[in-house]
Every structure is written in C-alpha cells, then in structure tokens.
C-alpha cells in the first residue's frame, strides 16, 4: 500500500497552470502588503519584537508557497496559522496564567500597581486652605493653576513641573490684574483659559498635580476635581525606589514590595499596604489551592459528580430517545415520513441560545407555561422548577433532551440507512424477530459507527456552558454560607466561569486558568482513551 | 415469513386490512404526532407569546391573541436596532461559515491525501485542542484582541473581522476532522487516475475532490453559520455599542433591561431571527445527516 501511494504521490505535482500561478502571486502579494503595513505600524510604536515576529511569519509563508514541492505545508498553512493564533496560543496562555496570580487584585505590572497605589492614596492636608481656581497656560502650552485665597486676599501660581513653574505668590508687581471682586483677570506671561477651553482640556485639568514645594512627596500638591476649587493634598505613602519600599506617613510604617505575593507587605506583622497588587508568578499555588482550599473543596466534589452525571445523562437520554425514534421511523411504509422528520429536527435548527431563554421562561414557577398550562391540574402546589436542586437538575436535563434528541435522531437514521438491507433480510429469512434484528444486528453496528460521535457528545456536554448558564446560571443558590458561590446546577465550567469573571472578591484568572487546564487534561484524556478503544482513532493509532 | 418480507418491500401493500395496518404502521403516525407536539410546543409557545400584548411571560394559551405590535415596535425601535443586529450577525456568520469550510477543506485534503511527517500527531492534536473549554480562553482571546486594537485596529476589539478570526480559529479543528472523514470516503483511485492523466494537485483538489463533496461543504457551512449565529459569549466580549451587536447579544439586552417588560418583544425578535435559519435547515435536511456524521457512518 505504502509503495503504491508513493508511486502516485501527489507531492511531485504536474506542471502548474499560468492562471493558478497568477492567483497565487496575487494572494501572496495581498498577504505581504498587509504584513508590511502592520510591521510599519509596529515600528512606529516601537514594538520591535512583535514586528520581528510578524516579519518572520510572513517570510515563512512566502517560502512555503514559492518553493517547489512541500505540498502538505501549502494546504495546511492557512488553517495552522489561525489555529496557532487563536486556539493553541489560548491554551498556552491559559497555562501560563494558571501559574500567576493574575486577577482583579493583580491586574498589571509592578509599575502600574505602584502608580495606582499612589493615585489612590491621596489625602487632603487637614486644616489647609481651599483655594478658588483659575486655570492658565504659559507659552509652552503647559497648564498652570492660579490659586486664589479669598480670605487672605493672596494669589498663587504654579505648574506641574516645580523646576519650571514653581508654586509661588504673585502680586501686582508680577503683572497681576484683578477685577473688583479680587479675581485675577490677567497675569503677565500666561493666558487665562475660558470655561470652554477648560472643558476641552478637562481630562488634563483634573489629573494635574501642582507641587506645593520642591519635594512632591513631602510638601504635597494642589489638585482639582471640578476646575473651580483646588485642594491641598499629600500622598499617604512615600515610595523609596532603591529599597522598593513604601512608607506610610501617618505612622512611618514600612512596607516592602513582596514579589512572592505581589503586594506591599509589612515585614513585621504581614499587614498589606493596599488591596492593589501586581502580577507575579506563584508556581503551582493555584493548583494546590484547588486540592487543599476548604472553601473550594467543599462544593467542588459535588459539582464534579454532577458534571459527570449531567454529561452522561444528557448523552444517554438524547441517544436513547433519538435511537428509538430512528428505529421506528426508518420505515418506508409510513406515509408523510419526510414531514415528520422535518418537524422532529426543528429544535436542532432553532438557535440554542433562544431555546434556553424560552425554556427558562416556561419553567418559571408562578407564571411559566409549564406549571400554568401543562401542569395546571396541580393547582396550588406547583413544582418550583428552578428553585430546588432536584427539580432544577431535572429541568436542565429536560431542556438538553429537547435540544439534543434531533441530532441523535439524525445521526442514528443516517447510520441505520447505511446498514446494508441484505443483513436484515437474511436475518428475517432465518426467522429473527424485529426486536432480535435490532438487538443482534443493528445496535452493535450502530454503536461501532456512532461511538466516536457519542464520545464527542459527552465531551461537548461536559463543558456545555450555554445550557446551564442561560437556563439557570448555575442556580438555585441554596447555600448562602459558601465562601465561593456554587449553585445546585453548576457544572465545572459554569463554576469556573464565575470564579474567572464574577467572583465575590473580583476575578481570579489565575485560579480559573488552573481549573481550565485541569478540565482540559481530564476531558482530553477521557476522550483520547475512549477514542482509542473505539474505531474513531484506529487509523491514527495503529 | 415471506409475506412479511413482501410487506416490507412493498409499502403500499395492505393485505391484512385496517387492523393489521394499525398494528404495523398506524401507531407510528400516532407516535409521530406526540413527538411532533413535543418538538413544536416551545416553538409554538414563543410564536404565540410574540403575538401577545402583555409584555411579560404570562402567556398560558396558544394564540389567544393576535397582536403584531411587538414586531413593528422591534423593527422600528431605536434603542434596540434589531435590523442592524440581523445584518451584523448574518455578515459575520456567513463569512465565518464560508471561510471556515474552505480553510478546513484545504487542511483536510492534506491530511487525507498527502503523506507527511507529523500527520497522525497532527490529526490527534486537532481533536484534542478542540476539547479546551473555549469559554475559559476568554481572557486570552480578549488579550489578543485588545493587543490587535492597539496595533491593527481594523481587526481588533469592536470589529467584525476580529470576531470572525476568533471564530475561525475555534472552528478549524473540528471542521478539519469532519472534512477529513469526507475526503476519506472518496476513493483514492479517482485522484490517481487523474494524476496519470497529468492533472496537477490543484486541479485534482479544486476540479475533482471539492466538486464531489460540494453538498457536504454547503452543509458544513450551514452548520457553522448556525453555530456562529447562536454564539453569545464571544460576541458579547468583542462588541460594546448597541449598533455593533449581534442578535444573540442584542436580544439578551432586551431581557436584561429590568425597567421594562420586553419578553413579548424578545419573542418577536426570536421568531424573526430563527425563521430564516430553520427554513434553510429543513430544506437542506437530506444533506445535513451526512454533514453531521462526518462520513463516519459510511464506514
């Protein structure tokens, strides 16, 4: 076989046509032009590594398509590039994140965290005068504050850079002109902004810090929130760049930048300076948390059990229902079969997110269609569908049955029709009953050909985020004492999604990524080994 | 036994009379009606709800009212630009469907017809990488897109092209594997014969193989279209302003607004967005079974 293939191998292609070559050169040209443009933009932004990377990829693409031979790469390149960028990269990125403490509290680099801490830790100087404010700009277009102390009748001016525009008192001798109320109307050397101009530069105005003395940290600064009044503020902490420490001014306590936890931490009693931290590598801490953290471990075992149960029951119920329907209706004697089949598969054609919403509405205990119309006879004791663990779990399984049975019906019908008719004929000549034919011939054959699809379906339902999230959002949430919220219908993926994007203490991407890596390994190995046992990968693994 | 066999072969033969017919075939009609009722009632419920004037979910009868204002309201609403959502969604889903089919077909051809180093591990990797829960890759996807926004705004956050690229990356693994199954069902002798006649690989691929599996390509494209059409999560992180949204995200907006009861309007939107897809789906039903099984059932 091998030899045979080699002889007729496509790799050594015939003579390419002129038109094909032109199309190829045109498409390559487009790619190169696009890449060239991006590289130029990147150079403009001084992102040299990224530009270099794009350049290398583009060169490789050109090499693949311009050289002779190397046919597989020509067919694989577009798919592989997209797959690497948006799928493989995502997997590796998640793997990397799972080793860090990335999350709401640790959202960026050290420098960003430092900046955020200093921004947030500003306190007004107690008892200091509040100035009325005019805003001006010098010839250098930099903003300056003109601060007016009405009570003392004094006027001050200063800009953000103390060395250029130090904060100082000015008088008429400096070219100050005041109106009847004492407000400055002009100052020599600067131009006072009108209200419109202030509005235009409002973001600059509200972030401007005008130092009150040469040492910004100690002397404090003037700042405004509305452009009309200016407060004298000081920082609550002083940063020492060499020692990487923060000193709290109120009690002179020293906090050291701890690169193990990504927080400023006191060496004496472990007190944290601020909730704001930065992203650091924490090794396998997120993974060990999954196995040791009591708050997680408590709900987790139940969730894992339910995830397996949900995935298994979803596949089982849809498959059995679809199979029975396929067996019954694979019968040309039934007239109108085409119409029946068309209606049976309608749930599959209805967009799944809409179905989920519709079922959620229908399961409503008070006003839902199911309790009021279908189960109206139950009267005063309606089933609290989405409010109790058991009924909510039944509800999501029912929704999934409705969503999933058409698919199973379709594939079972397809598989049944592929079984040679002579087999059934021979069996019935031998006197096998219809049931016996199903059991001894059709079912085994069906299972062989459908096993890979059933495994895929299990893997899909194991991570069936949509149904759970849109129907119950993991709820009902019956145990309010849990530190980490977990609901009665939560499967792993919805539980982890909540940790990742809407945890009670903010997002914890690190922990969520550790979970997703584990889920990936779990479902990947389950699928791999079951594929291996069935025909699905026979050809691959032989 | 021979009579039974004959009966099976000649559908219209009713030798046994009515009672025999009802025992063998009649009950199937009955069952079919029960199953149809099960399949249809949520759909009828949503159609019927879209025609009520109550606004909430309190609809307990089928077609008790026939009130079309929800439709006209939604089509003319400025807060909820439904027509724009539909246009966005159809554009995104159609481009994704077409491109993903073509790119997967290229890769599948290589896996099925060419022999190269790393072919088997490659196929295996395709399946396994699909198993990664894409919902949890959201942080990474968002990271990639926001970087792109800085460098190449045309394919960054808030652009259709960016979302399409993300969808393509996500659908290629499974698509390629399914398509690989189809290519395998076409006998190799066919391209070998063409090769002997002097055909190049591009001719074999475009003129022979692609044409043979064209119906499957259409179905795969349609399935990808429907999948993209129904995606909520990815679309919701990429777009922000109301006129950029897709139908899935937009309709969710209708339900999440706590100040108004928009359930009936949501139902109208659901009916209008689902109808075209369902018609397409049912009319292509014959081919869809093949598309789903990936040639697996043909052995």
Image: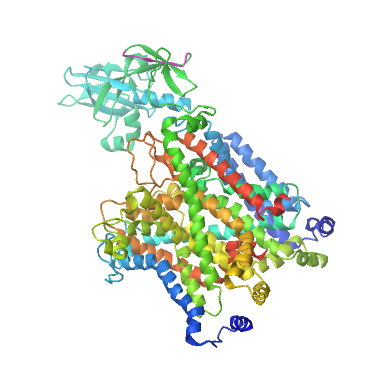
> Residue A207 falls in which quadrant of the image?
top left
Q: Is residue A315 above or below residue A526?
A: below
Q: Which residue occupies 49% across, 32% down?
A: A291
Q: x, y percentage for residue A275?
A: 38, 26
Q: Is A326 on the left-hand or right-hand side of B46?
A: right
Give the residues drawn in magenta, as a range: A243-250
Answer left or right for B289 relative to A155.
right
The quadrant of the image that shows the N terminus of chain B is bottom right
Q: In which quarter of the image is the C terminus of chain B?
A: bottom right
Viewer can see residue A77: no
- Above or below, comparing residue A462 to residue A272 in the picture: below
Identify the residue shown where x is 48% and y is 86%. Answer: B18
Q: Is residue A161 something one can see in this rendering?
A: yes
* Location of residue A75 in the rendering, given as x and y in whole percent from the top left corner: 69, 54
Q: Give the residue furthest to the front.
A: A431
Pick out the residue farthest to the left: A180
Q: Looking at this view, is A271 or A161 the one in front?
A: A271
In the picture provided, is A184 more to the left or to the right than A102? left
Q: Does the stretch in magenta take in A42?
A: no
Give A415 or A39, whichever is nearer the viewer.
A415
Residue appearing at x 50%, y 83% in the figure: B21
**Is B234 placed above or below A280 here?**
below
Question: What percent of the width, then of the height, locates residue B183?
Answer: 68, 62
For the rendered model, the colour scheme is rainbow
Front residue of A335 and A281: A335
Vertical arrangement, residue A288 with respect to residue A21, above or below: above
Q: Is residue A362 left or right of residue A26?
A: left
Number of callouts: 0
Classify residue A180 by image quadrant: top left
Measured as percent of width and height from the top left, residue B253 is found at: 35, 53
């Amino acid at each position: 076989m091998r030899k045979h293939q080699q002889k007729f191998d496509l790799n050594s292609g015939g003579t390419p046509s002129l038109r094909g070559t032109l199309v190829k050169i045109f498409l390559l040209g487009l790619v190169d032009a696009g890449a060239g443009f991006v590289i130029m933009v990147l150079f403009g932004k001084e992102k040299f590594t990224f530009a270099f990377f794009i350049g290398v990829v583009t060169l490789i693409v050109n090499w693949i398509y311009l050289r002779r031979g190397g046919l597989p790469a020509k067919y694989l390149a577009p798919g592989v590039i997209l797959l690497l960028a948006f799928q493989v990269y995502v997997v590796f990125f998640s793997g990397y994140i799972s080793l860090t403490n990335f999350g709401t509290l640790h959202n960026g680099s050290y420098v960003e965290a430092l900046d955020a801490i200093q921004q947030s830790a500003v306190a007004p100087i107690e008892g200091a005068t509040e100035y009325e404010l005019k805003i001006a700009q010098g010839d250098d277009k930099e903003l300056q504050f003109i601060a007016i102390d009405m009570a003392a009748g004094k006027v001050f001016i200063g800009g953000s850079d103390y060395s250029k525009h130090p904060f100082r008192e000015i008088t008429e001798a400096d070219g100050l002109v005041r109106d009847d109320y004492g407000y400055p109307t002009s100052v020599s050397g600067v131009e006072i902004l009108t209200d419109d101009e202030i509005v235009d530069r409002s973001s600059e105005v509200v972030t401007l810090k005008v130092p009150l003395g040469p040492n910004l940290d100690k002397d404090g600064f003037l700042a405004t929130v509305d452009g009309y009044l200016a407060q004298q503020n000081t920082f609550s902490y002083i940063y020492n760049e060499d020692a990487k420490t923060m000193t709290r001014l109120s009690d002179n306590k020293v906090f050291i930048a701890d690169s193990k936890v990504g927080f400023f931490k006191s060496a004496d009693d472990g007190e944290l300076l601020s909730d704001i931290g930065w992203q650091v590598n924490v090794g396998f801490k997120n993974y060990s948390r999954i196995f040791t953290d009591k708050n997680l471990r408590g709900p987790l075992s139940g969730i894992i059990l339910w995830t397996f149960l949900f995935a298994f029951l979803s596949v089982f119920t849809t498959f059995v229902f679809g199979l029975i329907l396929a067996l019954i209706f694979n019968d040309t004697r039934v007239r109108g079969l085409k119409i029946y089949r068309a209606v049976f598969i309608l749930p599959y054609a209805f967009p799944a997110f809409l179905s989920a919403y519709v079922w959620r509405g229908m399961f409503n205990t008070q006003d839902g269609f199911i309790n009021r119309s279908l189960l109206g006879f139950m009267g005063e004791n309606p089933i609290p569908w989405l409010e109790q663990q058991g009924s909510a779990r039944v509800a999501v399984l029912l929704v999934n049955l409705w969503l999933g049975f058409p698919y199973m019906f379709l594939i079972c019908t397809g598989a049944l029709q592929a079984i040679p008719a002579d087999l059934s004929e021979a069996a019935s000549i031998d006197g096998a009953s219809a049931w016996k034919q199903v059991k001894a011939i059709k079912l085994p054959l069906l299972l062989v050909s459908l096993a890979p699809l059933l495994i895929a379906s299990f893997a899909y339902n194991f991570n069936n985020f949509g149904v759970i999230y849109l129907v119950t959002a993991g709820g009902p949430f019956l145990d309010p004492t849990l530190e980490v919220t977990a609901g009665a219908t939560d499967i792993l993926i919805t539980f982890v999604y909540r940790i990742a994007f809407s945890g009670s203490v903010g997002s914890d991407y690190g922990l969520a990524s550790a979970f997703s890596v584990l889920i990936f390994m779990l479902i990947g190995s389950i699928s791999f080994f079951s594929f291996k046992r069935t025909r699905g990968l026979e050809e691959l693994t032989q | 036994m021979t009579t039974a066999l004959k009966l099976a072969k000649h559908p219209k033969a009713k030798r046994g009379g009515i009672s025999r017919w009802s025992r063998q075939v009649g009950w199937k009609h009955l069952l079919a009606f029960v199953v149809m009722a099960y399949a249809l009632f949520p759909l009828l419920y949503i159609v019927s709800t879209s025609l009520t004037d109550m606004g909430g979910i309190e609809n307990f009868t089928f077609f008790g009212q026939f009130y079309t204002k929800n439709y006209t309201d939604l089509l003319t609403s400025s807060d909820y630009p439904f027509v724009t959502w539909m246009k966005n969604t159809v554009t995104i889903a159609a481009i994704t469907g077409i491109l993903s089919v073509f790119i997967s077909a290229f890769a599948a051809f290589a896996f099925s017809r060419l022999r190269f180093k790393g072919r088997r591990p490659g196929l295996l990797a395709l399946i396994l990488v699909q198993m990664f829960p894409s919902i949890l890759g959201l942080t990474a996807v968002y990271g990639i897109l926001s970087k792109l926004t800085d460098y190449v705004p045309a394919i960054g956050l808030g652009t259709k092209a960016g979302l399409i690229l993300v969808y393509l990356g996500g659908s290629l693994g499974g698509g390629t594997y399914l398509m690989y199954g189809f290519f395998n069902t076409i006998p190799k002798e066919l391209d070998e014969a063409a090769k002997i006649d002097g055909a190049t690989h591009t001719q074999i691929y475009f003129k022979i193989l692609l044409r043979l599996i064209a119906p499957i390509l259409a179905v795969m494209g349609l399935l990808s279209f429907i999948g993209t059409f129904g995606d909520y999560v990815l679309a919701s992180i990429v777009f922000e302003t109301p006129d950029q949204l897709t139908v899935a995200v937009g309709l969710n907006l209708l339900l999440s607004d706590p100040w108004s009861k928009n359930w009936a309007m949501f139902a109208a939107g659901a009916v209008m967005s689902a109808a075209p897809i369902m018609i397409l789906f049912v009319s292509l039903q014959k081919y869809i079974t093949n598309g789903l099984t990936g040639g697996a059932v043909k052995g």
